[in-house]
Amino acid sequence: MSVTEPQGDTFARSLAHWSEAGRAGMDAFYRLATADYRHLAAARDWRAWLEERQRAAGARPLKLLDVACGSGKFPTALLAHAGVGEAAIEPIDYDLLDPSAFSVAEARAALKPPFEPGTEHVCTLQNLDCPEGAYDIAWATHALYAVPGAEVEAAMARFCQAIGRTGVGLLAHAVEEAHYLAFYRLFLDAFRGGKGEPYTGTERLQAALEAQGAEVEAQDIVYDTAAPESETAAVEGFLQRCVFDDSVPLAAMLEHPLTGPYLAACRQDGV
């Protein structure tokens, strides 16, 4: 399914980077950002959680929607670090949703049992068209930052519709004070004259879910991501992908009076 998508500045730059042309930047970003998914995989007993959902579904396979699936890093982490491959469950019917056809293809290629590739939705969450309660599980892992602020409520309404009254949703998302959001706000002020749509934080998503009548349980996962200061290329690639702009080099970020002090405060003992 393909639809006409919104063209907010942050959304548009995000979509442009999730492409074959942006692969080098994506790979550089994940040299550090893969840790996000490793920590998420360790945050709970996912094998037992999926087995519980399977018992609730009975003999039929679970139906799962991966929202803004990216390159499939979360299911890959679950297999590598959470023992999900040995779970006592049926093969999971794993649908993929992303406004980038490139990302859908990347995520599909990354899937391994028990995740079985299903329907592909090349669209945003807020444009998803599915019956109420179509999915037992819907998850969006570090996926919804570029949803334009004016469309957050619509996106969360579709998320709730997808799982209906009996399904379970999962959002793994950074809070307003986390690096990803805080650094992007500084970057917009420093290099774009304060213009641009800031990332959407957890707080806004949770409020929109609760406005839909959803019961929300929050769990904080706190960690640092680190790289040796000598790995300049990796740090530069990571930060450029954080802001979806590879035109500003690390040197400029370090020298600017807004982003420079922030990055200086991140340095500790050569890391």
Image: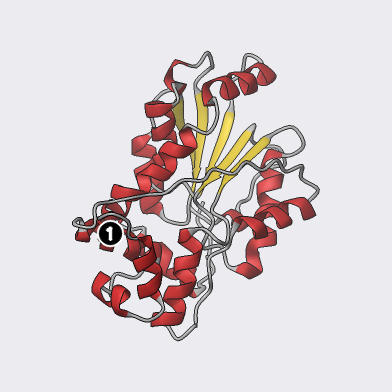
Disc 1 crowd rating (10 Å Cα; few below 14, some 14-19, many 20+) is many
Residue visible at 35% across and 36% down in the picture = 110
Relative image position of residue 248 (x, y in whole percent): 29, 75
Is the image coloured rainbow, by chain, by secondary structure, or in one colour? Answer: secondary structure
Query: Is residue 164 at all visible to an observer of this figure?
Result: yes
User: Quadrant where the C terminus lies?
Assistant: bottom left
Closer to us: 250 or 245: 250
- Label tally: 1
The amino acid pointed to by label 1 is Val
Relative image position of residue 100 (x, y in whole percent): 42, 56
Q: Relative to 23, is 16 on the left or the right? A: right
Q: Relative to 240, is 212 on the left or the right? A: right
Q: Judging from the image, what secondary structure is the residue with disc 1 in?
A: helix
Outermost residue, bottom direction? Answer: 193
Residue visible at 24% across and 74% down in the picture = 251
Q: Is residue 130 above or below residue 9?
A: above
Outermost residue, front direction? Answer: 269
Q: Is residue 258 above or below residue 149?
A: below
Relative image position of residue 122 (x, y in whole percent): 48, 52
Residue visible at 25% across and 55% down in the picture = 270
Q: Mark 1 points at which residue?
A: 235
Dividing the picture into quadrants, the one containing residue 247 is bottom left
Relative image position of residue 208 (x, y in whole percent): 72, 57
